[in-house]
Image (cartoon, grey):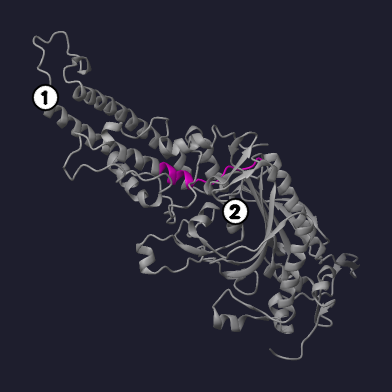
Amino acid sequence: MKPPARRFGCQQCRRLLVTEGGQSSRRPSFLRATSAFSSPSPSIRRRGQTIPPAGAVAPFYSSARKLHNQQQQEPGPPNPAPLPRRPTTAPKPVIDIRHIRENPELYAANCRARNYPAAAEYPGRIKELFAQWQDHQRQGRGLREAANRLRRQLTNPGDTSQSEPEPPSSPTPPPPPTRDALLAEGRRIKAELSTIEEAEARLQTEMHVLALAIPNLTSPSTPAGDEPRVLTYINDHPEAATTSTSESGAAQAQSDRVWRSHVHIGSELGLLDFAAAGATSGWGWYYLLDEAAQLEQALVSYALAAATRSGWRQVSPPSVVYSHMAGACGFQPRDANGETQVYALAQSADDAARGRPELCLAGTSEIPLAAMKADATLDEAELPLKRVAVSRCYRAEAGARGADTKGLYRVHEFTKVELFAWTAPDAAEAGDVFEEVVDFQTELLGSLGLHCRVLEMPAADLGASAWRKCDIEAFFPSRRDRNGGWGELTSASICTDYQARRLATRVRFAGKLDFPYTVNGTALAVPRVIAALLENGWDEADKSVAIPEVLRPWMDGRDKIGPRHHQL
């Protein structure tokens, strides 16, 4: 099932961002020229000094909010987080504001279902702002018509047909206005029109900022609420126990298997060093040693080889990206509480003063992969365009403490193999690629011998960009006391045109320009997979870990990792 149809194409969207109604906000030509209406007064702004260019959103948001408060004198919805500074060369987001303001209840309900309570106020607010903008447009049209009449009177002083008609009861027609009076009236109109145009621009800016903060719509396949739906299981549960009969005749489970956490196993075999990493970098970092470091490379090589055979082309992406690129993909530098989510690179005072955009460390290679086609136009014949990348990923994970503070499950830096694709702007075609990604993940993890479950994630768990999302969780023996031992290893998402619109990625489809859909999925999040392999492959009897058969070609043919009798 396709998401609700958008009502117009990209050219109309672009017009919407500039005029939102087809009425040009530009002045008549005689007001733009340095004519007799030009005033020496410094209070009259010159053309171009106030109206921001399309897409120059962040610097004008505070003034837009100030204008609204002055006009309404009542509190509005909570402000969205400030947008990262964007250079003029950045892609201009093309948001379907018309679809939002024509369906405010749909978007508001969607925000509430996805646990975005603040954003649920934005669709209605956009509708209100649009009504104000229309009122300014009407006032502007009236002023431009009056200015055109004045221009004609100045050009043809003897032509009284351009004057305002007088009521029939007027005993004596007033004398025609003098040239000085016409010029004074022109300056008044110009100043009033300038104020209206400034207000129009600020209203457009506020609508644009609010629209950018609204999450994607949600697939009908997505469960409501906050509980996922189990789709299938992969491999048998490793705790399948044999049964025996007690003296009372009752069946009882018995298993002599001893479970260890990967932290214990890594220490026992000399594979992990968290103490040295803590002294070097702090909490959330780690050293992989010997076979663990080799296992990381084996997993990466295995995943890349499998993806390449399946038609995914390899990319080696940058790890540093503009913050506005991360935001366009749905990753915000800070959450609603202002907590850091990504690592921003420090700017010099000079760079900040010169308005250079902020850089950050990519939390996933999904960001630089999506940005590869920013401001680009794809050809229909190229689709689906499939890429696979291996990269280091950086997550600040503010507030992530408690049960996951130890070990490899939740860390600040890790290696990940990512799948990313652009598809035709059609939910069915994007769904085919999405199923391909989930099947690939299932086969990959299944071949490693891990017991997993595939989940259809609920609406409350979806990120801003996702229309539909599936996770695959593996059984971690060390986590048996919480969530049944399950821990996320991979995820896959359909983002429809959410990212393409924000990155200005287009496709020539069916003879017109449209926005492609994007699909992404984790092939392997390496540290978590290593943790799962250590825990599930542990043999207490000989203190060793079994190496999955598919990885042995990259592990010098070894079938297990045993005790080491030396220190690094």
The C terminus - image quarter? bottom right
Q: Amino acid at mark 1?
A: Thr
Q: Amino acid at mark 2?
A: Ala
- Residue 134 visible at all: yes
Question: Who is closer to the viewer here, 89 or 134?
Answer: 89
The answer to whether residue 89 is above or below residue 251 is above
Which label belongs to residue 370? 2
**Residue 336 drawn at (x, y percent):** 46, 56
Name the secondary structure under disc 2.
Answer: helix
Residue at x 26% of width, y 36% of height: 33
**Around disc 1, counting alpha carbons within 10 Å, would you say few (fewer than 14), some (14 to 19), or many (20 or more)?**
few
Left or right of residue 172, residue 439 in this image: right
Q: Is residue 212 magenta?
A: yes
Q: Look at mark 1 in the image and give the residue it sits on.
A: 178
Q: Is residue 451 magenta?
A: no
The N terminus - image quarter? top right
**Residue 183 drawn at (x, y percent):** 16, 30
Q: Quadrant of residue 531?
A: bottom right
- Measured in 3D between alpha carbons, the distance from the residue under mark 1 to the one under mark 2, in whole angstroms, is 62 Å
Question: Who is closer to the viewer here, 428 or 454?
Answer: 428
**Residue 132 drawn at (x, y percent):** 35, 34
- Residue extent of the magenta highlight: 206-220
Left or right of residue 149, residue 387 in this image: right
Residue at x 69% of width, y 68% of height: 526
Name the secondary structure under disc 1.
Answer: loop
Left or right of residue 340, residue 468 in this image: right
Q: Earlier in the sequence, mark 1 or mark 2?
A: 1
Q: Quadrant of residue 291?
A: bottom right
Q: Quadrant of residue 488?
A: bottom right
Residue at x 12% of width, y 10% of height: 170
